[in-house]
Image (cartoon, rainbow, N blue to C red):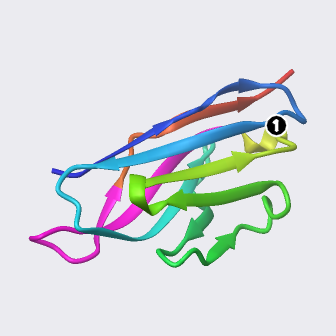
Amino acid sequence: QVQLVESGGGLVQPGGSLRLSCAASGSICSINTMGWYRQAPGKQRELVASITSGGRTNYADSVKGRFTISRDNAKNTMYLQMNSLKPEDTAVYYCNAGINTREYVNMNYWGKGTLVTVSS
């Protein structure tokens, strides 16, 4: 059984920083593309940033220059460094990954989410 667990969310003032982590565990052979998504109240879930197994990154226009996605393949962990946070960044942030196990190729997994609140 594969699990994705996010951590690092919380309350931060506008202009502040947070670092989210996503740890994958279980019967993992390898992990393909990983990504962070977010869902604000009353809005659809949207892609924030993604990173391939080779380290190629992609960002939503709204976070370019403020957020940095990275991963540690040896630890099966992904990170999201969020700087210059704005109230509109408030959302539940979800980890997503395409994971190869002995049974399945590139099975899509989601974490349960971590809440980020940007408010003074």
Name the foreground residue: 78 vs 38: 78
Lateral position of residue 3 relative to residue 70, left or right: left
Q: Quadrant of residue 8?
A: top right
User: Picture coordinates of residue 41 (x, y %)?
Assistant: 61, 39
Residue at the (64%, 59%) spot, across then down: 69
| Relative to 45, residue 42 above or below | above
Residue annotated with mark 1? 87
Q: Is residue 106 above or below residue 74?
A: below
What amino acid type should be assigned to the residue bearing mark 1? Pro
- Which residues are the magenta region? 91-109
Which quadrant of the figure has residue 104? bottom left
Pick whichever, 51 or 71, lies toward us.
71
Question: Residue placed farthest to the front in the image?
Answer: 74
- State yes or no: residue 97 in magenta: yes
Residue 94 visible, this angle: yes
Taking the image as shown, residue 114 lies to the left or right of residue 15, namely left
In the image, is residue 78 above or below residue 112?
below
Magenta run includes residue 77: no
Please give left or right for residue 78 compared with residue 27 in the image. right
Q: Left or right: where does residue 37 sit relative to residue 104?
A: right
- Of the 4 image quadrants, the one containing the C terminus is top right
Q: Is residue 41 visible?
A: no
* Residue 51: % across, % down: 56, 70
Looking at the image, which is closer to me, 85 or 46?
85
- Which residue is at 65% across, 34% downward? 116
Considering the whole magenta stretch, tell me its main secondary structure. Answer: strand
